[in-house]
Image (tube, helix red, strand yellow):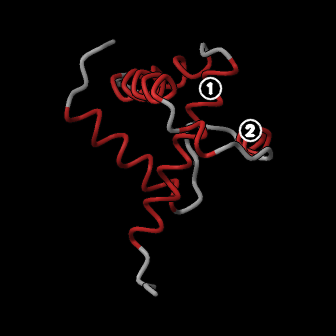
Amino acid sequence: MEKIEEKGLLQMEALLHHSTRGVHILFDNQTIARILRNPTNQSTLLEVDRLKQVQELLGELIARKTYTAKMAYLEGLEPQRLEILIRTYFNIVENTIRASSNQYH
């Protein structure tokens, strides 16, 4: 895995911020819809092996220095690994939106 630099984290934060506003720069709408159309078991997302995969996938994505490099990385992923990454990405987006919400019960 490539080394993650602070700049990469800042870029990822910006991409996530855009996604919270509905602008998904990294993924096309058809791919998002196809993958998120079918719900997944939340407990599956928390399995140790899955967490290791998620850490690797996100780490590799964040380590890519340019948008073009990030897109090339995503395009080269096997479909199953891309699905894991997209589900994780949107889980983070959803949790970010919830955390920033002013509505508390």
**Image spot of residue 78 (x, y percent):** 65, 14
> Measured from the top left, where is residue 93 in percent x and y?
50, 54
Asked if the residues shown at circle 2 and circle 1 are in contact, with their CB atoms under 8 angstroms apart, the answer is yes
Q: Amino acid at mark 2?
A: Ile
Q: Amino acid at mark 1?
A: Leu
Quadrant of residue 61 in the image?
top left
Eyeballing the image, is 32 above or below 105? above
* Near-viewer residue (74 or 98): 98
Left or right of 64 in this view: 95: right
Determine the residue positioned at 67% across, 21% down: 80
Quarter of the figure that contains the N terminus: top left
Q: From this viewpoint, which residue is outermost toward the left?
A: 6
Element class at badge 2: helix
- Residue 83 horizontal/vertical position (percent): 65, 30
Identify residue for label 2: 35
Q: Going 78% across and 40% down the picture, which residue do you hit?
A: 30
Q: Nearer the viewer, residue 89 or 42?
A: 42
Compared with residue 22, is residue 3 higher up or lower down, i.e. above or below? above
Q: Residue at x 43, y 60 (%)?
A: 96
Dividing the picture into quarters, in which one does residue 101 lie? bottom left
**Label placed on residue 13:** none
Q: Secondary structure at mark 1?
A: helix
Q: In the drawing, does residue 31 fall left or right of residue 105? A: right
The relative height of residue 49 versus residue 8 in the rendered view (above or below) is above
* Mark 2 neighbour density, 10 Å: few (under 14) some (14–19) many (20 or more): some
The x and y percentages for residue 23 are: 57, 54
Mark 2 and mark 1: span between their CA atoms?
Answer: 9 Å
Q: Earlier in the sequence, mark 2 or mark 1?
A: 2
Q: Is residue 31 left or right of residue 77?
A: right
* Residue highlighted by disc 1: 82
Q: How packed is label 1: few (under 14 Cα within 10 Å), some, or many (20 or more)?
A: some
